[in-house]
Amino acid sequence: MHEVTLLINIAVALVVAFIGGVLARRIGLPTIVGYLLAGIVIGPFTPGFVGDTETISQLAELGVIFLMFGVGLHFSLKDLWKVRSIAIPGAVGQIAFATLLGFGISRFWGWSVASGIILGFAISIASTVVLLRGLMDNGLLNTPHGQAAVGWLILEDLATVLILVLMPTLASASNGFDWGQLGLTLLKAAAFVIVALFAGTRLIPWILMRIAHTRSRELFILAILVIALGIALGAAEIFGISLALGAFVAGVVVSESPLSHQVGADILPFRESFAVLFFVSIGMLVNPVYLYNNIGPILALTGLIVIAKPLTTILMGLVFPWAARTTLVVAAGLSQIGEFSFIVGQAGVALGLLDRSQYSLILAGALLSIMLNPLMFRLIRPTEQWLQKSPGIWRLLDRQGPPLPQITESIEGHVVIVGYGRVGRHIVSLLGEMGIPHLVVEADAGQGEELNRRGIPILHGDAANSEVLTHAGLTRARALVIAGPDEDASALVVTTARDLAPELPIIARAASEDGTKHLTQLGAQDVIYPALEGGLEIVRHTLLQLGFPLQEIYRYTDAVRRDHYDLQLNTEEEHRLLHDLIDAANSIEIKWFRLPEGNPLVGQTLTEANLRSRTGASVVAILRERQLMANPKSMTVFQADDRIGLIGEKEEIEAAEGLLSESESESSDTGVEWET
């Protein structure tokens, strides 16, 4: 089965990964677990189909490049600087301590010095994918605690780049450490970074802007791929450094372009697809028999990752003046290892610093730690409560005062808005003007920063692809508004929201006629299709100009919406409402007019004006200083600038107009201003 084509390998790997990812999410685990297990299933150590390890590994190299390119693209020195007091000492201290722990246990197992150092490096670096998913799922990403964890992780990512640069030097140091080789490696890396940053930041943004002006999406995506792969391969071939470092620097260079957000959106499908193949290729290297025979070392290594690393963070929290909840969130979030540990381990195998069995041990520790990570997040609150029972330890750990309550713990009677695009921004502004509490769920970091500056409560995360909605307080909310244009994402949000809050009113935006029906079937009460909403607005204005009553028009257009914008008369209700509309237009008419100062009616009561007996039309409402008086009493006195609503048949309205026109002629400079 090794003589199979590239297409079959890709297809089988993706299908099995999809099944594994779905099963992992169904039981509440990160999808990475499913991808790794999928690799084990099609690997050479299990029965059934055996994928071509070499072919999939070469494809996985693209996954490494795109992963590191994404890290560089989203690298922000400004964000890191905001949390420097936590991230810098914390990341440096934990990497050093975890590396020593890994090295120590490796010596106990009889590993070589080099392999022990690689093991220490591997367990010191947490997974970006797992951390971000954990923070999103628990509504922590946009909090100060989540930002500290992300800043900490940025430094770990930078440490990964440095480790990958230095590993070839470590491999050549079997006969003694070669300081000259180390200096040469660092010099090459520095030369590459300088050339790329100084030349690339001027040239590449200019190229991307020129390509964007061609208005060709295909050329723009192709340019991104050429830049990412070209710089990564150039770094390896010309400067002799790793593909990972080249890809990271390529991302940093592209981030200087004003089009960087579009680059991130366009590169995402490639990154996710090849990252899946990367995780599958990792799983293919795992030998289940080896794991069974070495369960003791696996559990010991997992203990270092899941228990020793968090305890290290908590101990540092006793030394540094951090908030207690920040310490606990960081400890939970970084108690796992993942893709960067795999990259370091793979490089170690390629350089001869690790053998396959040692690498399998790292993979097993990563797999178990990822599976346990959701539990670590759930332990944050119980651990906080347990520590508070020891006031002395708590005061030492929490030197920034009591933590602020989370947004979703203190908000109720609010409107949840998913998406802060053009539509969502308008809704947020309107609710703010009206003083109605609201909460925004948004995945884009740039939009999140704007919301934070405006002081608008936000949960940062993808509502369609995470557990973030569980933290939005839907059971206490007044309504959910899904303002994004992606129908597939909206469908997932509607389904989740209906499960969490069965009675919650849901207003959703559709992008097609079929989408309006689908979202309604899933449980959205009101589905708005902007493209056809404009057509209904034209219908409304047309009918108003033709003299049809406003309320009857609204009843008819609402019926069209309920029938999913089908303008054909297909339902009995639409036929009935259309006939009501016609009958109302032929019989009863409502008309408004403004009463200017000096009009003879000003100062008279409704009884004195006696409009009904004189014309047959009745006064049904008076609008005065933005206050509506419905069915005004007989002793109500007309005032200047009142807007008077009259109802009656067409002839009666005309008679009222004639009477008031006579009053107008009797008064020199006054009159009646009619309105529709």
Image (spheres, rainbow, N blue to C red):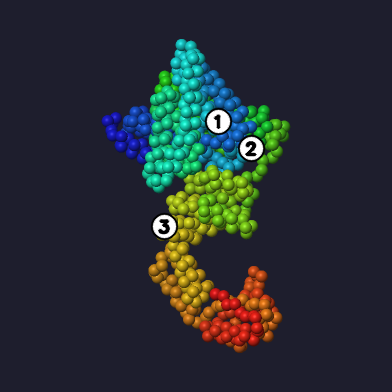
- Where's residue 136, x and y in %? 54, 42
- Where's residue 486, x and y in %? 45, 51
Q: Mark 3 sits on what residue?
A: 512
Q: Residue at point 49% right, 57% down?
A: 508
Determine the CA span between mark 3 and mark 2: 45 Å
Q: Residue 325 carries which label?
A: 2
Q: Looking at numbered disc 2 in the image, what kind of residue is underneath it?
A: Arg
Q: In this view, does 444 lie above or below 152?
A: below
Q: Mark 1 sits on what residue?
A: 155
Q: Residue farthest to the left?
A: 3
Tell me if label 3 and label 1 are in contact, CB under 8 Å.
Answer: no
The reply, left or right, for residue 459 in relation to residue 112 is: right
Determine the CA span between mark 3 and mark 1: 44 Å
For the N terminus, give its image quadrant: top left
* 2 vs 1, front mark: 1
Q: Residue at point 43% right, 64% down?
A: 565
Q: Looking at numbered disc 1 in the image, what kind of residue is underneath it?
A: Leu
Determine the CA span between mark 2 and mark 1: 21 Å
The reply, left or right, for residue 396 in relation to residue 377 is: right
- Where's residue 252, x and y in %? 49, 34
The 10 Å Cα crowd at callout 3, few under 14, some 14 to 19, many 20 or more, is some
